[in-house]
Amino acid sequence: MTVFALVDCNNFYASCEKLFNPELKDKPVVVLSNNDGCVVARSAEVKALGIPMGVPWFKIQREAKHYGIVAYSSNYALYADMSNRVVEILSGFSPNIEVYSIDESFLDLSGFERQGYAEYGMEIRQRIADWLGLAVCVGIGPTKTLAKLANHCAKKQLAGENGVCDFTRLTTADLTCLFERIPINEIWGVGRQLTAKLEAMGIKTVRQLRDADSRMIRDRFSVVLERTIQELRGISCMDLEEVTPDRQQIISSRSFGTLIYDLADLEEAVASYTARAAEKLRQQDSLAGAVQVMIRTNVFKPEVPQYQKAVTVPLPEATADTRMLSCWTRRVLKRIYRAGYGYHKAGIALLDIRPRANQQFGLFVADDHARSRNDRLMGTLDAINGRYGRGALRLAAEGVEKPWQMRRGNLSPRYTTEWDGVAKVRAG
DNA sequence: CTATAACTCTCAA
DNA sequence: CTAACGTTGAGAGTTATAG
């Protein structure tokens, strides 16, 4: 039987910021979403103050000032780099690992027990603390859903100790007793809607859901929830997904720092988003067969005139050429743009994605010679940007001033990925 | 009518 | 000073459409 561990970094973004600025050690720290919009990470001190996850920053700014909360803009380069280091360490503990998100990984621990699996979990936790200075919690169980739940118990100190909770060591009776006390919304895959529906039926605790009639659940809900029930019972339905499959769609969208009225500015933004998405597309060696463009006014301001539109168009020939793709996204944008509105957000999506190897050539589109020349050009573009940084070489259509760019009022240095940032690391 | 495409809803981090 | 509310991806289920 497989034993799964779920390793999750505590307050990951906030912890990364603290790591490189010792003055923040016991201070309340939040990290904001793109555009400095919402709180997406909170240090323990902030959680203790009762600041909720996801709250719009401007709504708590006064309170934050009062408590001396330090706010950072998202520094994705820093978090991604730290995340890679965590994964590298975890890979030393099991050959089978699924990197589930930027701060969470599943490990197959089967056969690695010491006295039990909890001791191995402690070793993992200790090494990440020693080598990186980051705190993680480890949940262990016979299914991924149970490992996730065990991790929740470790974090909330409902079971286990020292940030490690091992369900394989609990008796059935203890587990049942524990599940009585956990609400269903803590279960992986049970979100807001399901919680409301299940509660209306009187199913409020993990134990109740685990012991519910799974056939009834499938009929009234879905096969997904039925699988969750099986997993809660210790019957594994979800495998470790070690290889991340190629994306089926690539989306690039962003809110603007200020409202945008001009088509020309929107064109720049859309060209930039298209370039980023196309880069990702080429990284996985794929082609897109369709593009979508979306623009919208501020949905949080219903008092101003609202407009939103998204249109998808198939391409005459699948491509990964930034110029071709941005030509199409620009065309679609012009079609959906209506003057007189203040736009708040725009985005593009690359759809109908397929491997380059399966490329079908359009009959009247381009000759082989042109195609290979374009491929080489894109290869050169990516190579230059890989060496000199994103956006070093780009289409003129992406603009220079970029009045639409998002707010990032309080960005920390890229401590680990840029020389300028490295120089700013303080001794701690 | 069926098979598939397109779209909507839900969830997650 | 003001105004200020994230992004990306997947899968299931439902509805529309083609043949």
Image (cartoon, coloured by chain):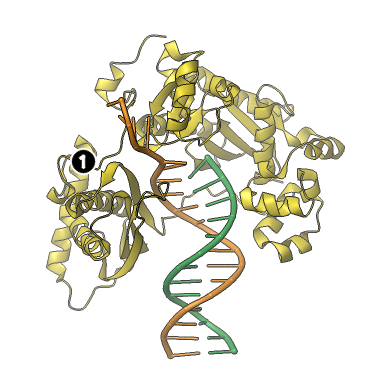
Chain colours: A yellow, B green, C orange
* Residue A370 falls left or right of residue C17: left
Whether residue A353 is visible, yes or no, is no
Q: Position of residue A375 (x, y in %)?
A: 19, 58
Give the camera-side residue of A184 and A234.
Answer: A184
Provide the secondary structure element on which disc 1 rests: loop
Residue type at numbered disc 1: Pro
* Quadrant of the image occupied by residue A212: bottom right
Q: Quadrant of the C terminus of chain A?
A: top left
In the rendered image, the residue lying farthest to the top is A427
Q: Which quarter of the figure has residue A350?
A: bottom left
Rendered residue at 65%/58% (across/down): A224
> Where in the figure is residue A278, as x and y percent of width and height?
27, 54
Q: Is residue A202 above or below residue A186?
A: below
Q: For this rendering, which residue is in front, A156 or A347?
A: A347
Q: Name the residue under label 1.
A: A403
The residue nearer to you, when weighing A92 against A348, is: A348
